[in-house]
């Protein structure tokens, strides 16, 4: 009975809960329904409000757009009217300009017609005056023929002769002007031509004046001179300042350098190394130093020999060394030291013949080319270098001036300077001194004199300065001063056309008129 009561209570509780839940569900559904209906009503009212606001806004925007359209139409109408007004003004302006141009053309046309009429009248007057002038000219010619007793042809010939004489003078003046202009332009062109010629001919000259050849006992020695990785040849070139050329030439090595003393040091050192057979950097350094001392001793002894041969005293020991360096210097194949000795002896002889002190002349002649010993090391011509060296080592002003003037760089103001000039020219220009065949030399001088003598008015001519100058004596009664310029030009042209010669030839013409009378 107790269990039944428990189960009955549970069933009753379950039923009570079910009834309560159903009531609550029913009440919740009704509540939500009421809320939903209220929300729907509120939404419908809001929708109606929004639609009303939208309609009002659309009406307002419509009115604004209509107003803006009216304003734009009004603005466009104003702009069109303004543009039309501007175009009307421009058209009116163009019309006025066209009318003005038409009026201007009409006025010009009238002016041209008037000028043509005036020109026709002037032409008629000119023709009348021309006829009058012709008649006056004819009457004047007739009168002149009567007065001068010359016919028209004779008068014309007389005037042409006078005009020809005046033209000769003007032609000579013009030729002088053109020669000066051509000389200035020619100097510039000559520099360019010489530079190009030097570039093309450098190989031949260098091969004669800047290389020495050292013979080898065998070709195996070339490898020993080169050394491992070229260390031996680099050491020789660095110590001597000379380039070693090792090519396919059998059993020979070429030494190349513009400085003759360095080349001589390298030659002696290389010959010693080859004869010794021990070739390595330390041995090379020792041998080069020995060769340098040997060359310096040779230079000193050669300089002392030259001073003793000439017989001058008190020459500075540095100048003696420079004289010795000239032993390794050549000029056109002529050894400069031997040339200096020749000039010294010639200067002494000329000075003795003139009754002057031969010692100063010998000293100046011996030192005149001293600058050539330094021209590989110091910038400037050998004359400038020699003057500076002579002054540095306290030579007399007479010797310094002779050095400065021996090539005409400055005017010779002393007899000693003139003597050195003459001796230098004799030594350099004598047959055989500078690689010229004696027979060809004589033929060239004879041909030059013969060519100059072939012109009318030439009295005599002489080729001097080894053919670098021809001095022509002119007959003054045949050739005037003005005609001399033309004659010199013609002689130069003929020399250029018919002779082959080195350098240039100076045509020096001399015209002298003398009047001699005796007072009794």
Image (spheres, grey):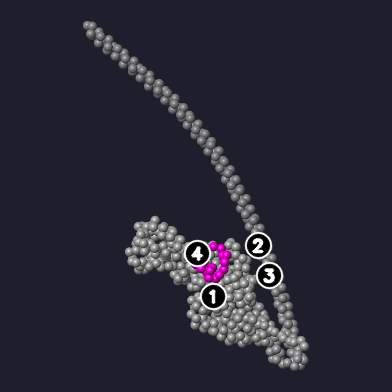
Give whichever of discs 2 and 3 has the lower sequence position.
2
- In space, the residues marked 3 and 4 are separated at their CA atoms by 102 Å
Q: Check residue 427 in the rendering and tell me which mark sits there, or answer none.
A: 1
Residue drawn at the location 72% of the way across and 81% of the way down: 123
Which is more foreground, mark 1 or mark 4?
Answer: 4
Give whichever of discs 1 and 3 has the lower sequence position.
3
- Across and down, in percent, residue 261 comes to 47, 64
Q: Which residue is mark 3?
A: 105
Q: Which residue is mark 4?
A: 300
Residue stretch rendered in magenta on the structure: 300-317
Q: Is residue 433 visible?
A: yes
Name above or below for residue 364 compared with residue 227: below
Residue drawn at the location 60% of the way across and 72% of the way down: 358
At mark 1, the secondary structure is helix
Q: Which residue is mark 2?
A: 94
Residue drawn at the location 56% of the way across and 63% of the way down: 316
Which is more foreground, mark 1 or mark 3?
Answer: 1
């Amino acid at each position: 009975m107790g269990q039944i009561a428990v189960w009955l209570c549970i069933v009753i509780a379950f039923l009570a809960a079910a009834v309560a839940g159903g009531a609550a569900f029913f009440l919740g559904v009704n509540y939500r329904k009421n809320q939903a209906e209220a929300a729907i009503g509120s939404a419908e009212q809001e929708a109606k409000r929004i639609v009303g606001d939208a309609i009002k806004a659309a009406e307002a925007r419509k009115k604004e757009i209509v107003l803006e359209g009216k304003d734009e139409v009004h603005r466009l109408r104003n702009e069109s009217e303004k543009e039309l007004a501007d175009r009307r003004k421009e058209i009116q302006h163009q019309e006025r300009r066209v009318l003005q141009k038409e009026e201007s053309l009409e006025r010009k046309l009238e002016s041209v017609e008037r000028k043509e009429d005036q020109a026709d009248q002037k032409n008629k007057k000119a023709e009348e005056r021309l006829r009058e002038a012709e008649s006056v000219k004819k009457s004047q010619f007739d009168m002149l023929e009567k007065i001068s007793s010359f016919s028209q042809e004779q008068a014309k010939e007389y005037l042409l002769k006078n005009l020809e004489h005046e033209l000769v003078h003007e032609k000579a003046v013009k030729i002088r002007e053109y020669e000066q202009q051509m000389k200035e332009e020619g100097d510039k062109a000559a520099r360019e031509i010489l530079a190009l010629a030097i570039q093309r001919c450098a190989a031949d000259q260098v091969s004669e004046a800047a290389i020495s050849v050292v013979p080898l006992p065998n070709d195996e020695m070339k490898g020993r001179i080169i050394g491992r990785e070229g260390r031996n040849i680099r050491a020789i070139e660095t110590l001597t300042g000379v380039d070693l050329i090792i090519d396919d030439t059998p059993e020979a090595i070429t030494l190349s350098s513009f400085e003759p003393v360095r080349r001589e040091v390298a030659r002696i050192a290389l010959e010693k190394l080859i004869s010794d057979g021990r070739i390595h950097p330390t041995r090379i350094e020792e041998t080069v130093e020995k060769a340098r001392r040997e060359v310096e001793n040779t230079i000193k002894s050669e300089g002392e020999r030259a001073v003793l041969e000439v017989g001058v005293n008190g020459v500075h020991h540095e100048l003696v060394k420079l004289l010795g360096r000239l032993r390794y210097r050549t000029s056109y194949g002529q050894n400069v030291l031997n040339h200096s000795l020749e000039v010294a002896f010639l200067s002494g002889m000329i000075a003795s013949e003139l009754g002057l002190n031969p010692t100063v002349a010998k000293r100046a002649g011996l030192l005149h080319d001293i600058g050539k010993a330094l021209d590989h090391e110091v910038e400037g011509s050998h004359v400038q270098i020699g003057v500076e060296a002579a002054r540095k080592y306290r030579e007399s002003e007479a010797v310094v001036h002779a050095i400065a003037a021996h090539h005409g760089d400055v005017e010779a103001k002393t007899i000693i300077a003139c003597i050195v000039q003459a001796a230098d020219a004799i030594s350099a220009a004598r047959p055989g001194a500078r690689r010229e065949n004696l027979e060809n030399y004589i033929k060239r001088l004879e041909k030059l004199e013969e060519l100059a003598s072939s012109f009318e008015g030439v009295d005599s001519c002489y080729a001097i300065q080894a053919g670098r100058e021809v001095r022509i004596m002119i007959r003054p009664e045949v050739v005037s001063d003005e005609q001399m310029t033309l004659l010199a030009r013609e002689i130069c042209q003929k020399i250029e056309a018919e002779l082959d010669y080195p350098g240039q030839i100076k045509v020096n013409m001399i015209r002298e008129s003398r009047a001699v009378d005796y007072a009794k």
